[in-house]
Image (spheres, rainbow, N blue to C red):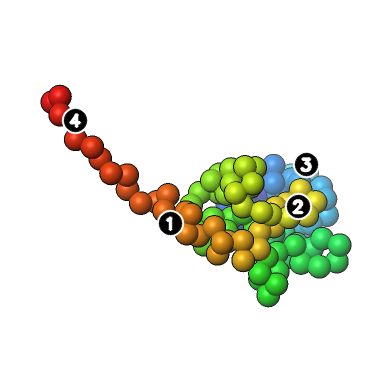
Amino acid sequence: MRTTITGAALFMRVSRQAIYWAIRNGKLKAELVNGKWNIVIRDIEEYMVKRYNRLFSTFDGSLLFDPKKGERSVKQAAGLLDVSIHRIYYYLTKGIIQGIRKNKTWVIHDSEIERIRPYIEVRKLPHKVVPNKNL
């Protein structure tokens, strides 16, 4: 069974440009017939299985984020601490959390996440509301 660029984009829940990129870079097999791209559904499913996953990215031959070594991404750290990703980036830039740069990616160690956890728990406490006596 075959589909078009639009059909593949809808099936994969990505943009048409993403499909064109995958074809142009040889990641997704497609055939140009009468000026229209035809893509076999089986090839789309195969591409989806092999598609890039940041958790399995490597840097200098080793995993970028290795849970066995206690290395986490910013997104993973945010999930563990129940804060936004932007908050983790803020903590990194202010030096509140120590991280390691691997290429363009921040890597945060589990010990650093546990060290910062009490600080974040205190920040989550509701502030004491002082009643306005003028009302």
Which of pointers 2 and 4 lies earlier in the amino acid sequence?
2
Q: Secondary structure at mark 4?
A: loop
Within 10 Å of disc 4 (Cα), the crowding (few <14, some 14-19, many 20+) is few
**Mark 3 or mark 2, which is nearer the start of the sequence?**
3
**Viewer-nearest of labels 3 and 4?**
4
Look at the image and tell me whether residue 15 can be seen. no
The circle on residue 35 is: 3
Q: Secondary structure at mark 1?
A: helix
Residue on which the image places disc 1: 121
Q: Residue at x 78, y 44 (%)?
A: 34
Q: CA distance from mark 3 to mark 1?
A: 59 Å
Which numbered mark, 3 or 1, is in the foreground of this view? 1
Please state if 13 lies on the left or on the right of 55 as rendered.
Answer: left
* Residue 9 vs residue 58, the one in the foreground: 58
Q: Residue furthest bottom?
A: 68
| Residue occupying image coordinates x 23% and y 37% | 130
* Quadrant of the snapshot with the N terminus: bottom right
Mark 4–mark 1 Cα distance, whole angstroms, equals 27 Å
Q: Amino acid at mark 4?
A: Asn
- Viewer-nearest of discs 2 and 3: 2
Q: Residues within 10 Å of mark 2 (few under 14, many from 20)?
A: few
**Labels 4 & 1 near each other (Cβ < 8 A):** no
The numbered dot on residue 132 is: 4
**Nearer the N terminus, badge 4 or badge 1?**
1
Q: Would residue 124 appear left or right of 27 to someone viewing this image?
A: left
Residue 66 in percent (x, y) is at: 70, 69
Could you tell me the amino acid type at mark 3? Gly
Give how far across and how far down residue 67 sits, in percent.
66, 71
